Amino acid sequence: MATLCRPAVSVPEHVITMEETLALARSRHADHPQLPLALRLIENTGVRTRHLVQPIEETLKHPGFDERNALYAAEAKARVPAVVRRALDDAELRTQDIDVIIYVSCTGFMMPSLTAWLINEMDFSSDTRQIPIAQLGCAAGGAAVNRAHDFCTAYPEANALIVACEFCSLCYQPTDLGIGSLLSNGLFGDGVAAAVVRGRGGTGIALERNGSYLIPKTEDWIAYDVRPTGFHFMLDKRVPTTMEPLAPALKELAGQHGWNASELDFYIIHAGGPRILDDLSKFLQVPPDAFRFSRATLTEYGNIASAVVLDALRRLFDEGGAPHTARGLLAGFGPGITAEMSLGRWHCPDDAPELAEAAV
């Protein structure tokens, strides 16, 4: 039984508030014909604060793609190891106990992947498998959980380490003035997260089933246009409507498992924006409070891409977790339009004997 253990999460020290974001938009785009609409959309995100790897003065500059990517690599190497150590400690494992590292990121590029550097720097075994995933965007957090589940199903005694490293601020493009780009400037934040999936033992979500779903003919709704200046984020105005076709996929996966997606005990959902969570609440027929962990991540950190689902899960742990065998759903959404979905039960070994005695 593969168990997704407590995630460790870290956000950078530089903070920008909603008020500061709006003031910057007004000062830098005073003549933009759609500025009032952009300001209203940014306010409606509900994002109160975001964390950045650089002070805002440096973030707003564009020294070139090469310098930005070098900064991505340097910041990843500086910030990821501490988060990995905490995740390993929470799972009560050592680096030598890890059989595969799944690294997800869509905001910078390294080859070899950071996985190779981590194996050398942190004394993982030299035969540790590496699975870097670079092109699933925000859905990659859910995909990492699913690939870890698959690996531990194939190798039941194995342990997988998931690392999500997203520095969205390094993708800021000062010349992109479309409404989607202006909205993104007030929505995305930076963060690093890590979690262990244990093949045996551990407290957390005992993973039982996973699946993927792609909405046909939507591959250009969320995309990167790669230019000499780097990654230019393309966001179609139809993206907020995607929960209507994705909710049936979530229901179908739950139904295949004999569960009703509207009657689960906890939900860990990618918080791409408030409309995503509001619509999913409506289409799944669950109360808005079911997504409180995702909303808290969005409010405090913004959209931290693939790291969102791990931070939302971390918040469930902080609340005290769930009752032993409580049923839950984890889902990430991203380019494609793709959904990566998982089902599992809360597993707490310390509670299991007490429940067994109560049942006798």
Image (cartoon, rainbow, N blue to C red):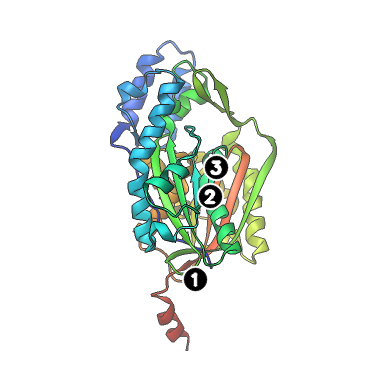
Q: Position of residue 29 (x, y in %)?
A: 41, 14
Badge 1, how many Cα within 10 Å: few under 14, some, many 20+?
some
Q: Secondary structure at mark 1?
A: loop
Q: Position of residue 355 (x, y in %)?
A: 44, 80
- Counting residues from the N terminus, which is met first, the one under dot 2 or under dot 1? 2
Q: Amino acid at mark 1?
A: Thr
Q: Secondary structure at mark 3?
A: strand
Badge 3, how many Cα within 10 Å: few under 14, some, many 20+?
some
| Residue in front for this viewpoint, 305 or 228 | 228
| Residues at discs 2 and 1 in contact (Cβ within 8 Å) | no
Q: Which residue is denoted by mark 2 in the rendering?
A: 144
Quick check: can you spot residue 359?
A: yes
Describe residue 88's horizontal placement relative to residue 65 as left or right: left
Residue drawn at (34%, 59%) of the image: 89
Mark 2 and mark 3: span between their CA atoms?
8 Å
Q: Quadrant of residue 21?
A: top left
| Residues at discs 2 and 3 in contact (Cβ within 8 Å) | yes
Describe residue 340's horizontal placement relative to residue 324 as left or right: right
Q: Position of residue 313 (x, y in %)?
A: 43, 54
What is the number of the mark on residue 279?
A: none
Q: Which residue is denoted by mark 1 in the rendering?
A: 325
